Image (cartoon, rainbow, N blue to C red):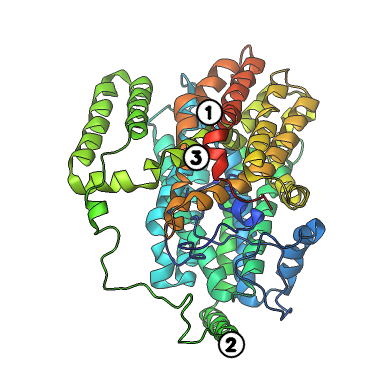
């Protein structure tokens, strides 16, 4: 799942400054799929199919896109083989990671239903409120990772992982216990039940802000350049496996089976959080961590020693930057940077309009005034104006490209905001009753489809893949506009996932291609901003309102029109990319593989 934000810059992942654009398609997709905002763009999430830990043949830390296509079957199977062969330290990460993936995605999939049908029971526009509360969780995790990624670096990965699980456990106890052991009843917005639930969500946000960066930092510390790709590929595989396991939660929830209801299933997930904490404490002992880090450092040093070194008197490629020279930030060119370009002013105006439209009447002018004042202050202060003028978003092509993809990315957010409620309300029979099966199908499909589609599109041009992929992803929304039938639902899920696998990995590839020399990391980080905005804006602007109006829990429904609107929104990305083909498309120099 989307994958969830992600501009944290730490030692967690592969440094991108100055690197080329050659990333594994699966690795790039992983950056987005931890949709909670989970990992920063500098995390090397899983590079191409990699050797097992037992294999001693060296491999490039930066795979060459020109090499022959990888075997799709090997890409699918190898991570699970590597899980079995992994040393104890990585088992301590992997076992807890798959458990936490199941718990997070399982609770997230129920969250809009939990708020709408219980916490906000009887509240007018309950779906709007529930979607806004879910937005707090998903967007909050993104922000928390930005600020809390340092914990693993400062106090060690074991401390960060255990601390994160403690916070996640306490938060989920509050969420699960609010309507049960605390005996709180639905009394509307601002009720004790609401506030206790949100307090639990707050702890989960802080916990995840520590956990996700720490997990990737641990993999990097426990592996060498030769085995890092395998380590991150394992996390990718386990993340998808964990995201798919909630498909079977209906066995716990539904009254025909255990009949625990959503709050009961939440307690089961809370118990699994405790299990993940115990696994981390028991398997990832201080000695295990020290030994794993020491072994990885020793093997890395041995690999470095085996590398041929360039002669010291070499004239080509031996020049080093003059550390005493002023950086480009201190040059006259930087000092004379122009004012922010026109498209940034237009963007701010649109933000002001959105704030005025969606804020309550009594807060409209306050919100607009604060946003406008902050922007004017930033552009009037010389230093901040120069920073804005040089920011990656000041690049008109880059700005257009990443924001043109926001419409199609709205489909990602529907996986947890819309699909669970829509399927349970609009479908009769087993599909609606066991809505978890369909709403959680995306992770397992994307895992199998990415290597297959990557192999089939190895020689395709990147920009063409972006256009075709966004079209394929957006088009099936119009299937659901036909009506809530089993074939339209599963057609939507499968075709949308195919489209995702076609274009999503190429997104970050372009961000790296267009970046000026030495600024790849900055561009990669900013490329994630639209995804963060999508997670925030979709529930704030329309998803809850659309559900209340066209797919309410009770009363007549018009889901056909709702999905027609969703399809029209998503297809805008394809149209925008086609319109800009002559302007932006010429900058794509590489093929998709």
Residue at coordinates 42% horizontally, 38% vertically from top-left? 396
Crowd around label 2: few <14 · some 14–19 · many ≥20 (10 Å): few
Looking at this rendering, what residue extends furthest in the front direction? Answer: 315
Q: Which percent across, then down, holds residue 146?
A: 40, 54
Question: In the image, which disc is placed on residue 302?
Answer: 2
Please identify the quarter of the rendering in which residue 517 is found: bottom left
Q: Name the secondary structure under disc 2.
A: helix
Marks 3 and 2 close (CB-CB < 8 Å): no
Q: Is residue 372 left or right of residue 518?
A: left
Q: Is residue 314 left or right of residue 227?
A: left
Relative to 268, say whether 67 is above or below.
below
The answer to whether residue 410 is seen in the rendering is no
Question: In the image, which disc is placed on residue 402?
Answer: 3
Q: CA distance from mark 1 to mark 3?
A: 33 Å
Crowd around label 1: few <14 · some 14–19 · many ≥20 (10 Å): many
Q: Which percent across, then down, holds residue 333?
A: 26, 52
């Amino acid at each position: 799942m989307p994958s969830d934000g992600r501009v944290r810059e730490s030692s967690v992942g592969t440094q991108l400054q100055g690197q080329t654009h050659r990333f594994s398609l699966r690795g790039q997709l992983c950056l987005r799929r931890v949709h909670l905002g989970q990992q920063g763009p500098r995390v090397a999430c899983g590079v191409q199919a990699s050797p097992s830990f037992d294999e001693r043949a060296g491999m490039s830390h930066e795979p060459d896109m020109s090499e022959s296509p990888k075997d799709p079957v090997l890409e699918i199977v190898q991570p699970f083989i590597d899980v079995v062969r992994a040393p104890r330290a990585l088992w301590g990460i992997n076992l807890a990671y798959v458990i936490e993936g199941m718990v997070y995605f399982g609770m997230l999939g129920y969250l809009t239903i939990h708020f709408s049908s219980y916490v906000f029971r009887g509240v007018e526009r309950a779906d709007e409120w529930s979607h806004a509360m879910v937005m707090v969780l998903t967007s909050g995790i993104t922000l928390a990772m930005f600020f809390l990624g340092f914990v693993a670096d400062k106090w060690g990965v074991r401390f960060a992982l255990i601390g994160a699980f403690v916070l996640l456990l306490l938060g989920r106890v509050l969420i699960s216990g609010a309507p049960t052991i605390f005996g709180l009843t639905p009394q509307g917005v601002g009720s004790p039940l609401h506030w206790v639930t949100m307090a639990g969500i707050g702890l989960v946000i802080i916990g995840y802000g520590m956990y996700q960066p720490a997990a990737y930092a641990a993999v990097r510390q426990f592996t060498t350049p030769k085995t890092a790709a395998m380590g991150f590929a394992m996390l990718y595989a386990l993340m998808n496996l964990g995201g798919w396991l909630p498909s079977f939660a209906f066995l716990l929830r539904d009254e025909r089976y255990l009949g625990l209801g959503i709050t009961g299933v939440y307690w089961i997930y809370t118990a699994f959080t405790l299990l993940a904490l115990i696994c981390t404490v028991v398997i990832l002992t201080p000695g295990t961590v020290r030994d794993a880090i020491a072994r990885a450092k020793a093997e890395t040093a041995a690999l470095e020693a085996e590398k041929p070194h360039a002669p010291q008197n070499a004239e080509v490629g031996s020049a080093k930057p003059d550390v005493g020279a002023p950086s480009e930030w201190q040059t006259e060119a930087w000092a004379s940077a122009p004012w922010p370009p026109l498209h940034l002013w237009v963007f701010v105006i649109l933000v002001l309009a959105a704030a005025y439209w969606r804020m309550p009447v009594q807060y409209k002018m306050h919100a607009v005034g604060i946003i406008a004042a902050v922007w004017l202050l930033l552009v009037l202060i010389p230093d901040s104006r120069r920073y804005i003028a040089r920011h990656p978003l000041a690049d008109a092509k880059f700005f257009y490209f990443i924001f043109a993809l926001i419409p199609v990315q709205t489909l990602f957010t529907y996986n947890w905001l819309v699909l669970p409620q829509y399927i349970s309300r609009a479908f009769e029979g087993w599909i609606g009753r066991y809505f978890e099966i369909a709403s959680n199908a995306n992770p397992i499909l994307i895992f199998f489809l990415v290597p297959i589609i990557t192999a089939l599109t190895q020689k395709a041009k990147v920009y063409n893949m972006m256009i075709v992929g966004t079209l394929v992803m957006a088009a099936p929304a119009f299937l659901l506009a036909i009506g809530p039938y089993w074939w339209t639902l599963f057609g939507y899920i499968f075709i949308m996932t195919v489209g995702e696998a076609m274009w999503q990995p190429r997104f970050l590839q372009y961000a790296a291609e267009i970046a000026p020399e030495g600024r790849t990391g900055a561009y990669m980080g900013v490329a994630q901003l639209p995804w963060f905005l999508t997670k925030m804006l979709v529930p704030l602007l329309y998803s809850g309102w659309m559900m209340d109006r066209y797919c309410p829990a009770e009363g007549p429904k018009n889901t056909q029109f709702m999905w027609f609107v969703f399809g029209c929104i998503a297809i805008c990305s394809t149209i925008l990319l086609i319109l800009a083909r002559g302007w932006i498309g010429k900058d794509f120099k590489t093929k998709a593989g």
